[in-house]
Image: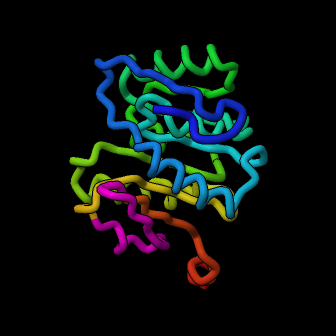
């Protein structure tokens, strides 16, 4: 895997073979960040990277200037790798070894972008539970965005805060946000 843009552009990061991960492909990651570049100044946002695995997405945000990054993964080896890579590159990534659902239920953090890359073999309900907790607990800042990566065989479009999706090969990014019509519904 490599960092696509920013301070560490073209930097290759080699993760140990024993990590239980499926990193986002470089092509899909580049496309995702092209989309995000239209919404945010990376040095002005905070990011929560769920099921962070190798830290691939966290490094990309950090390379582009994001200083407030939280990475959450249940596997100790993943967190250890993220911590070592962040230290080696001088990135300020706050990592948490935790079950993602438990973390979301307890965290006081609110961020601008939440990215979740759960295992593709999750059932649809497991994906939707991530969005449910995030929106029920109001974990996004105003104009915040939740992005869930999943396979083309998973359909998350029925969630009330689903906005749109982008497909790149077998990878799909579903975007969720509170729109003005959603917030006016809440006020009624």
The one of 88 and 13 positioned closer to us in this rendering:
13
The one of 23 and 159 positioned closer to us in this rendering:
23
Q: Is residue 90 magenta?
A: no
Residue occupying image coordinates x 46% and y 41%? 50
For the record, the magenta segment spans: 155-171
User: Which quadrant of the structure image shows residue 117?
Assistant: top left
The one of 157 and 63 positioned closer to us in this rendering:
63
Q: Is residue 163 left or right of residue 179?
A: left
Q: Is residue 14 left or right of residue 138?
A: left
Residue occupying image coordinates x 59% and y 32%? 10
Q: Quadrant of the N terminus?
A: top left
Q: Position of residue 130 (x, y in %)?
A: 40, 53
Q: Position of residue 30 (x, y in %)?
A: 53, 50
Q: Is residue 178 left or right of residue 153?
A: right
Q: Position of residue 32 (x, y in %)?
A: 53, 55
- Residue 108 in view here: no
Rendered view: 167 above or below 180: above
Residue occupying image coordinates x 66% and y 35%? 62
Rendered view: 88 above or below 133: above
Q: Position of residue 116 (x, y in %)?
A: 44, 47
- Residue 94 in view here: yes
């Amino acid at each position: 895997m490599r960092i696509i843009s920013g301070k560490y552009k073209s930097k290759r990061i080699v993760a140990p073979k024993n990590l239980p991960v499926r990193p986002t492909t470089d092509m899909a990651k580049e496309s995702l960040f092209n989309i995000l570049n239209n919404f945010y100044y990376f040095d002005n946002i905070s990011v929560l990277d769920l099921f962070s695995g190798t830290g691939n997405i966290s490094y990309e945000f950090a390379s582009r200037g994001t200083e407030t990054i939280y990475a959450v993964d249940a596997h100790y080896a993943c967190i250890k790798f993220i911590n070592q890579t962040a230290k080696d590159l001088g990135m300020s990534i706050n990592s948490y070894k935790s079950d993602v659902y438990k973390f979301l239920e307890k965290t006081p953090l609110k961020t601008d972008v939440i990215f979740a890359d759960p295992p593709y073999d999750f059932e649809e309900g497991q994906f939707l539970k991530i969005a449910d907790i995030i929106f029920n607990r109001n974990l996004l800042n105003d104009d915040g965005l939740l992005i869930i990566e999943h396979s083309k065989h998973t359909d998350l479009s029925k969630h009330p805060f689903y906005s749109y999706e982008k497909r790149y090969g077998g990878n799909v990014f579903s975007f969720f946000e509170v729109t003005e019509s959603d917030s006016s519904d809440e006020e009624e």
